[in-house]
Amino acid sequence: MDNKKYRFNHIGIPTTRKLKNEKYLPDLDIYVSGYEENEFNVEWMRYGKQCKAPDIVKRLPHVAFEVDDIFEAIKGHEVIIEPNAPSDGVIVAFILVNEAPIELMQWVCERS
């Protein structure tokens, strides 16, 4: 197993509280906050009523890892959210590993 192909990016924690500086992602009906505001790479996620994310993603925290090729990285795993682009410059997918959601991220442009 090659653990070096997965680079830690953040941990996502579901919340039901409205938090300061939330950013709304209307296509997903998700409010996100904290990702660029704390030194711990923690992102809080509040899900709207129309959000189609699987219940397990809405209930459990997830860890996100950067990968070079998201389509290669999801091979052989149970994909619970297909690759998609929630923000400019990044493709994400969620897989299920031992009943826990894991987010995989592929940057498709240079980050500043």
Image: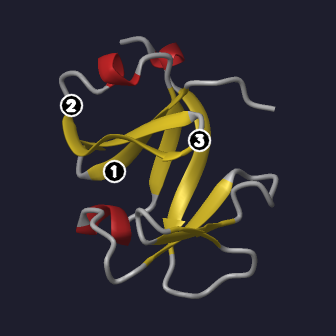
Q: Residue 50 location in percent, x, y?
A: 31, 78
Q: Nearer the viewer, residue 23 or 74?
A: 23
The C terminus is located in which quarter?
top right
Mark nearest the camera among 1 and 3 is 3
Determine whether, in the image, residue 99 is placed left or right of residue 34. left
Q: Residue at x 43, y 39 (%)?
A: 92
Marks 2 and 3 close (CB-CB < 8 Å): no
User: Which numbered marker is on residue 101?
Assistant: 1
User: Label 1: how many residues lie within 10 Å, few (<14), some (14-19) or many (20+)?
Assistant: many
Q: Amino acid at mark 2?
A: His
User: Which numbered marker is on residue 77?
Assistant: 2
Mark 2 residue element: loop
Q: Tell me how far mark 1 sits from mark 3, CA to CA.
A: 23 Å
User: Label 2: how many residues lie within 10 Å, few (<14), some (14-19) or many (20+)?
Assistant: few
- Which badge, 2 or 3, comes first in the chain's sequence? 2
Q: Residue furthest top?
A: 2
Marks 1 and 3 close (CB-CB < 8 Å): no
- Which badge, 1 or 2, comes first in the chain's sequence? 2
Q: Amino acid at mark 1?
A: Pro
Quadrant of res 55: bottom left
Q: Residue 20 location in percent, x, y?
A: 74, 81
Q: Residue 81 location in percent, x, y?
A: 28, 47
Q: Nearer the viewer, residue 42 or 93?
A: 93
Identify whether 11 is placed above or below 111. Answer: below
Q: Tell me how far mark 1 sits from mark 2, CA to CA.
A: 11 Å
- Which badge, 1 or 3, comes first in the chain's sequence? 3
The N terminus is located in which quarter?
top left
Q: Residue at x 53, y 58 (%)?
A: 12
Determine whether, in the image, residue 16 is placed left or right of residue 84. right
Which residue position is annotated with label 3? 88
Q: Amino acid at mark 3?
A: Asp
